[in-house]
Image (cartoon, helix red, strand yellow):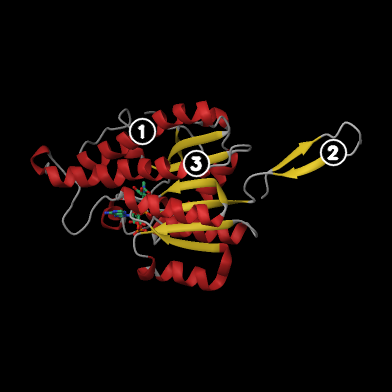
Amino acid sequence: MGVVAVCHNRKKTAPMKLKVGLTKACALIQGASRGIGLALVDELLKSNTDQLVIATCRNPRSSDGLKSLMENYGERLKVFPLDPTVESSTIKVAEMLSKQSTSIELLVNCTGILHDSKLRPEKRIDDINIENLIELFKVNSISAMLAIKHLRKFLLRDSRSVIVNLSARVGSISDNCLGGWYGYRSSKAALNQLTKTLSIELQRNLPLNVCVALHPGTVDTQLSQPFQSAIPKEKIFTTQTAARQILDVISKLNSTDTGSFIAWDGSKIPW
Ligand SMILES: NC(=O)c1ccc[n+]([C@@H]2O[C@H](COP(=O)([O-])OP(=O)(O)OC[C@H]3O[C@@H](n4cnc5c(N)ncnc54)[C@H](OP(=O)(O)O)[C@@H]3O)[C@@H](O)[C@H]2O)c1
């Protein structure tokens, strides 16, 4: 995808085409080792025959999914190591991107944590733990902002660019009827506020940018697995279905959507 400026030469009738700026626009998927991020990389590679896809994750070597996509797609897929919770790591990726002479058309932040070996979603106030809360905010809210802070200079300026931060419906304050999951809910609510705030700033410098928080639905991944028993099977999306739905929503976004919280089916979610 090239950026082309048309300059009319007064003496001749035919317009002169001047190539300016960067020559390729890529999609960059952050947190792509597994789950929804990996499925997005797969779908983008399948559906768009010439777009460069950049996948980042903490340990590329340990992702069999990314390794197999690299074997199948060669130069169309670049994989960079990135720990989105470490600012210097994002700066390194920005330096690598400069060498690629590429601009970004789509940036999706997929990083998220609900549980790990030490961390379980809180059922009650007694479960509140300072280290866990800090970890949840670092991974679920702050990491996306660090990525955008250092990568926004690569966003397309002369045509639409899209930033999607994967959020969760449980981050909606007005939709909270069940309680529990203090840390996950509030870190996603914080991500939503950060996304809205960012969208306002970006509108000033990048009026063609669309920046949204997006709920992917309940998706069969490592993140949701321990909590799936309460959900009817037909309401749980495969990662492939989720990725297709997300890309479909993204394809329909326009500048009036910037700063909103959107679900997998394109409907708006109340804050
Ligand atoms: N699955 C669902 O039902 C569901 C529902 C609503 C919202 N979401 C959101 O969708 C996004 C993707 O989730 P998923 O379901 O695909 O989950 P997943 O398979 O567990 O993937 C989560 C991603 O987050 C990154 N990550 C996890 N812990 C991290 C940490 N401590 N530091 C840095 N990065 C970390 C991993 O990145 P690496 O690639 O670097 O390993 C991984 O790729 C998340 O933001 C999640 O909150 C999911």
Q: Is residue 233 above or below residue 157?
A: below
Tell me the residue at 52%/56% (across/down). Answer: 99
Q: Residue furthest front?
A: 11
Q: Secondary structure at mark 3?
A: helix
Q: Is residue 83 above or below residue 62?
A: above
3D distance between C-alphas at marks 3 and 1 = 18 Å
- Amino acid type, label 1: Leu
Graded by Cα atoms within 10 Å as few (under 14), some (14 to 19) or many (20 or more), the crowding at tag 2 reads few
Residue 139, can we see it? Answer: yes
Q: Which residue is mark 3?
A: 153
- CB atoms at circles 2 and 1 under 8 Å apart? no
Q: Quadrant of residue 140?
A: top left
The residue at 27%/32% (across/down) is 177
The reply to whether residue 238 is in sight is no
**Residue drawn at x 12%, y 42% as measured from the top left:** 130
| Label drawn at residue 15 | 2
Q: Disc 2 or 3, which lies upstream in sequence?
A: 2
Q: Is residue 22 left or right of residue 197?
A: right
Tell me where residue 60 appears, x and y as whole percent: 39, 66
Measuring 32% from the left and 27% from the top, which residue is drawn there?
174
Q: Which mark is residue 194?
A: 1
